[in-house]
Image (tube, grey):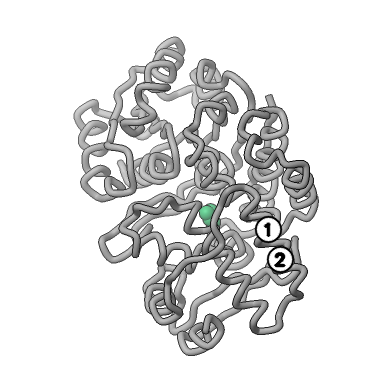
Amino acid sequence: MDRINIQASTDYEVLIGKGLIDSCGTHIRECLFRAQKALIVTDSNVAPLYLGRVKSSLEREGFSVSDYVFEAGEEKKNIDSIAGMWAVMAEEEFTRTDIVVSLGGGVATDMGGFAAATFLRGIKVVQIPTSLLAMADAALGGKTGIDLPQGKNLVGAFHQPSMVIEDTDCLATLPSEVFTEGMAEVIKYAFIMDKELYGVLSEIADSGKAMSLQEDIDTLTKILISCVKDKAEVITEDEKDNGRRQILNYGHTIGHVIERNSNFTLAHGVCVAKGMGIITDACLKSSMMSADTAESIKDLIKAYGLPTEDPITPEDAVSGAMNDKKKRGDTISLILVNEIGKAEIKKMTPEELLEFLR
Ligand code: GLY
């Protein structure tokens, strides 16, 4: 098992290894020795696979365990689900030393974290991500929240977990399209800050093994560890997203608009991949990057089974982006990668963004 430390307002460990679902109770008990009750928040796809095992592991450590299972999908990432979690905790008389355990993909980790951030003005949360996307990104760094009809993640709180437990055995059984969308966030780290990871991912792609990476858990674990270390570095530097953390939004500004316009029928990672491709085209057209770099970026995204294009018009992209929570005043911070391994944050007005995307 690997342990990676994240230094934020509270320091915590990310545990990465095989079989951790069945020993999660022991690890949670080691760091939260006063907790008596745990609420497991998970979705209807993950519950049949792992809820019973996580529950048993917690019960073996003396926890009294409740659960809240919501219907899988982005649609349930709303205040009604959070109210349901609050109600269970209130009925079970949770106190401030009790805990929430989020189990699943990004929707579960965001909502479990938000329920914990708000119940009794804040109780502890442990994140157990089971998708590649959540392991590499969503479960780390304390961003929690829900969607509004007006936009994704518009309500939320920063609430760092007490521990993140990543069982790499979960990756082998992910549906292949769920695995593939997670690769968008993995590839993102290579582009924005990790040239070495870019080298590893390119080598796999060049040897024709990109689409079978899911079967190679050892290589995948090494890649995941690189991503977690990258994210730990960024969170340590800028926990509250006022500076460098914004580079993690590469591909997300346009990606979120595409995701919302599809009524969430397109997966988040697929939309991020499209967003990265669209920004790359715009950078190339604006002569900010070389044709070789643009080709390398798009080739890597495609090699892992992800798209780099979308029919969205520049006008729709801009009006959607201006509704994004990352907008500050009249400008939006767009993340650009013109050299692999290096991201820059560029503030743009709506007019500048439109001009850039046209
Ligand atoms: N997912 C981007 C961030 O955690 O900042």
Residue 350 higher or lower than 162, as above or below: below
Task: Answer whether labels 1 and 2 touch (C-beta < 8 Å).
Answer: yes
Q: Position of residue 336 (x, y in %)?
A: 64, 71
The residue to which callout 1 is attached is 299
Q: Position of residue 182 (x, y in %)?
A: 54, 45
Q: In percent of the image, x 45 and y 79: which residue is there?
A: 314
Residue 243 higher or lower than 14, as above or below: below
Disc 2 crowd, CA 10 A, few/some/many (<14, 14-19, 20+): some
Q: In percent of the image, x 45 and y 53: which residue is there?
A: 268
**Which amino acid type corresponds to the residue marked 2 in the rendered image?**
Glu
Q: In percent of the image, x 28 and y 31: which residue is there?
A: 68
Q: CA distance from mark 1 to mark 2?
A: 6 Å
The residue to which callout 2 is attached is 295
Q: Position of residue 239 (x, y in %)?
A: 57, 56
Decide if residue 175 is in sight here: yes
| Quadrant in the rendering for residue 90 | top left
